[in-house]
Image (cartoon, grey):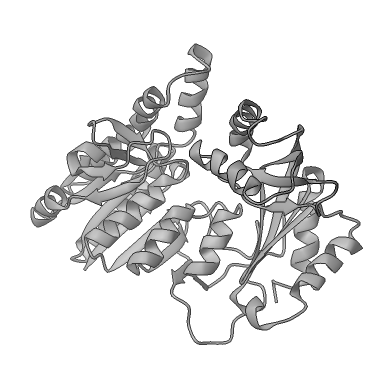
Amino acid sequence: MLVVKKFGGSSVANKERIFNVAQRCIEDYKAGNDVVVVLSAMGDTTDNLIEMAESINPNAKKREMDMLLTTGEQVSVSLMAMAMQALDVPAVSLNAFQVMMHSTSRYGNARFKRVDTERILHELDSRKIVIVTGFQGVNKYDDITTLGRGGSDTTAVALAAVLHADKCEIYTDVDGVYTADPRIVKNARKLDVVTYDEMLELASLGAKVLHNRSVEMAKKYNVELVVRSSLNRSEGTVVKEASHMEKMLVTGVAADKNTARISVIGVQDKPGIAFNIFDTLAKSNINVDIILQSVGREGTKDISFTVADNDLENAIKVLEENKDRLTIQQITWEEEVAKLSIVGAGMMSNPGVAAKMFESLYNSRININMISTSEIRITVLVDEKDIDQAMVAVHDGFAVND
């Protein structure tokens, strides 16, 4: 059996935890399995490197940031190989270039194009544990690239897909996927199973357990994931294709504070204006989420939408530069907002879900700024100061912990 095991930064934060991870991987190895391990950078390494870079050059090129940040994973994998060797188990550490994990050329947020397997299979045939750097790829210029925060999850799923692994285990510092953030919602409970679609929505909407692109890839290649803790032996949460069993009405509640709202005021009320605005933003790689358009009045309308906090400055700059062409009279923005979402495949066949969510927020006197829906999700924008209270209110309103 071939097993891919991914460990996050907190799982390898110090010497003791490195040896703990090494022992867990060796258990699988000694059971006769082929083992591929994917690691993130140790502890707060990435944050510390970013801080150091900003102290030297706040406007550093993304290419150079990728060169810097990928050193963190290289440290992790080499130390892990040393730990396993110290325990008399053959192991080899490989970076993205040595495996050859081909990616797109977008620095800071690259995507995998293909992954070569020859080197990994050769090392596995030699009965070694193979330890691979997460979070990184190599583009057509032979430059190292990064996949965005949480990208090690995507590395693990990509390797599991191309190697046709029997299991892909994602180890973190929590026991699995919860109905809400257990640090905020004290009665949140761990889910035994969650579907790809539900997990993709939760990951995209602020649940930090899995990188959303890793779930996207797992669904595409039918890679069954298990999310479990590296600090205990609990079973964790299985992420897989939907079953035919009756679904809970709401599977989980997620919050995302990395959100800003932009309003473009007084644009012309005619066909093509909305397309021009969002096409202009898309060409600058700015993702837009919730969109609200006002009813036209006197030949103009207002459009409000949300973007990630780190895209706000660039979005405003792009809109200002194209203000006349886009017929924008005024641009306003708000940073102190957050998204609250409920997710559940059971919502599709149950009317009144939105009303229940809005009732829960009303009972807590929390105002809703914007609303967005899909078949299995309802998202509202609220003031950031209210987000924790809102999460508890909605979680309790749907009794998600039942």
Classify residue 9 by image quadrant: top left
In this rendering, the count of numbered labels is 0
Picture layout, residue 214 above or below residue 337: below
Where does residue 268 sit, x and y in percent of width and height? Answer: 73, 43
Where does residue 291 sit, x and y in percent of width and height? Answer: 68, 52
Residue at x-position 18% and y-position 39%: 98
Which of the pair 67/265 is nearer the observer?
265
Residue at x-position 9% and y-position 56%: 125
Classify residue 320 by image quadrant: top right
On the question of residue 176 being in view, the answer is no
Which of the pair 223/229 is nearer the observer?
223
Where does residue 208 sit, x and y in percent of width and height? Answer: 55, 51
Looking at the image, residue 321 sits to the left or right of residue 110; the answer is right
Picture layout, residue 400 above or below residue 121: below
Residue at x-position 59% and y-position 34%: 310
Residue at x-position 77% and y-position 60%: 392
On the question of residue 156 being in view, the answer is yes
Looking at the image, residue 45 sits to the left or right of residue 382; the answer is left
Where does residue 6 sit, x and y in percent of width and height? Answer: 36, 52
Picture layout, residue 277 above or below residue 56: below
Give the position of the C terminus as an image quadrant: bottom right
